Image (cartoon, grey):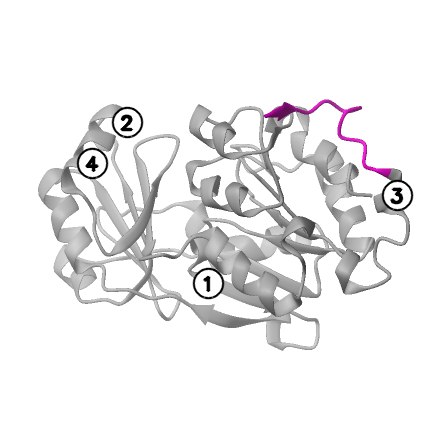
Amino acid sequence: MTTLTETSVAGNDDRRENENDNNGLKLMVALDVDGTLVDHDGHMSPGVREAAQAVVAAGHEVMIATGRSLNATLPVIENIGIERGYAVCCNGGVTLRLHPELDNGYEVLHKATFDPAPALRALRERLPAAKYALEDEDGNFLSTERFQDPSFGVEAVGVDFHTMLEATAVRVVVFSTENTPEEFNEAIEHVGLAGVTYSVGWTAWLDIAAAGVTKASALENLRLQLGIDPDRTVAIGDGRNDIEMLGWAGRGVAMGQAPEEVIAAADEVTHSVFDDGAAHVLRSLL
């Protein structure tokens, strides 16, 4: 594990020369959003924005890879000026292609859907007071308990739990204000969720996707499509939903405030989101 400083992340001069003469030298750079590009208030510093824009302008394949849903991801893409390329939303459940000639500037290339009913029933039994939300295959959000969150990107429609069981899901979110994070984690472990992929957030928050679907699985599909060598991949993240992505990347960088298990999955550690850690790494790619 290497701990990065502003000087130690300076890139190799030989690597910088003629970086983008051909696709074999182009980097594929995957960027988490919350806790990486923006702080927990949703603020992106000028330093992070400028560093990301510079890497985009240098011709590298820069792509957002986030747990956020599509409509909550698009403003971040616009903020750092990615007009062409790809993005991964919903923890790998949705892959976008970006191009200014497309309607609204993007198209959905792939959605990984699943039947949420078994997981929802099992969780409801253990966490009856939790709030549940579900993104369906049409991009709508359904929720219980008037559950809303900025990561949804749209206003969720209140429904009863039975209606959620009948939907086809891209993403399921479970949040509890009635349980401590420890109680929440214990309940999830007791349920033993099968047939899905899931990750626990910083608080009593759970994201669920289709089995085998992660940010890493979606990024690997894009890497193969783009013909970029595995050692030319870079990823920066801070959450437990970034663990697979950091292990996938040739250079996986954890943010300084990341939990221990996230740091253990990374090759390097940069500064925290409050000290523009992502900007330090991005500048090293120029």
Q: Which residue is mark 4?
A: 189
- Please say if the residues under marks 3 and 4 sit with CB atoms less than 8 Å apart: no
- Determine which residue is flagged by label 1: 94
- Name the residue carrying label 2: 181
In magenta segment, residue 247:
no
User: Are discs 4 and 2 less than 8 Å apart at CB?
Assistant: no
Which structural element holds mark 3?
Answer: helix
Q: Amino acid at mark 4?
A: Glu
Residue in view at x 38 percent, y 55 percent: 155
- Magenta region, residue range: 1-12
Instruction: Say which label, 4 or 1, has the lower sequence index.
Output: 1
Q: Quadrant where the C terminus lies?
A: top right
Please report whichever mark, 3 or 4, sits nearer to the chain's N-terminal start: 3
Q: Mark 2: few, some, or many residues within 10 Å (few <14, many ≥20)?
A: some
Residue 225 shown left or right of residue 160 in the figure: right
The answer to which quarter of the image holds residue 166 is bottom left
Pair 2/3: label in front: 3
Q: Which residue is mark 3?
A: 14
x and y, in percent, of residue 121 in the image: 12, 52
Gap between marks 2 and 3, in whole Å? 47 Å
Q: Quadrant of the N terminus?
A: top right
The amino acid pointed to by label 1 is: Val
